[in-house]
Image (tube, rainbow, N blue to C red):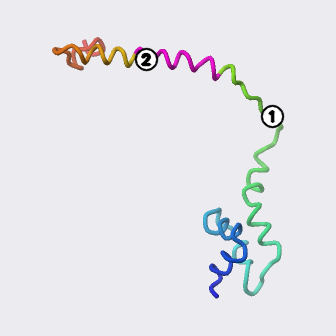
Amino acid sequence: MHVAVRLLVTDPRLAVAVYFGLTTPYQYRLVGPGAWRGARDAILSTRERILQPLMTRHVAITTNDNRRRSLLLPTFIGGALVALALMLCQRRADWDWRSSVLFR
């Protein structure tokens, strides 16, 4: 049985990490001469080991739902005003986008 098919059948999580994840030298240690039992764990933990040195300080993650809600209303009102302006401009038969206020 081919190594790729055997890997997909025996350990699908590892197969997905090998095919779609980061390329690492540990992949050569999965089977064959020089096989290493820790290769599976090393491949599956590659992303955490790359990101770990970048997390040098602990930052409290807070969700600020009030800020998100406060921006929602002005965004909606602004979008409605733009849509209204476009509808009013389209109703005028002689309106041309080049004759708008921006291009005078």
User: Which residue is identified by label 2?
Assistant: 80
Location of the C terminus (image quadrant):
top left
Q: Which residue is drawn at 34% across and 14% down?
A: 85
User: Which residue is identified by label 1?
Assistant: 59
Residue 18 picture location, percent across and down: 66, 69
The one nearer the camera, 19 or 22, is 19
Count of number-bearing discs:
2
The one nearer the camera, 82 or 55, is 82
Task: Name which quarter of the figure residue 40 lies in.
Answer: bottom right
Determine whether, in the image, residue 46 is placed left or right of residue 2: right
Residue 80 picture location, percent across and down: 43, 17
The segment highlighted magenta reads 68-81
Mark number displayed over residue 24 = none
Determine whether, in the image, residue 20 is placed left or right of residue 86: right
- SS category of the residue bearing label 2: helix
Tell me if residue 76 is in the magenta stretch: yes
Q: How far apart are marks 2 and 1 (CA)?
A: 38 Å
> Reading the chain from its start, which is encountered first: label 2 or label 1?
1
Residue 81 picture location, percent across and down: 41, 14
Asked if disc 2 and disc 1 are in contact, CB closer than 8 Å, the reply is no
The one nearer the camera, 29 or 93, is 93
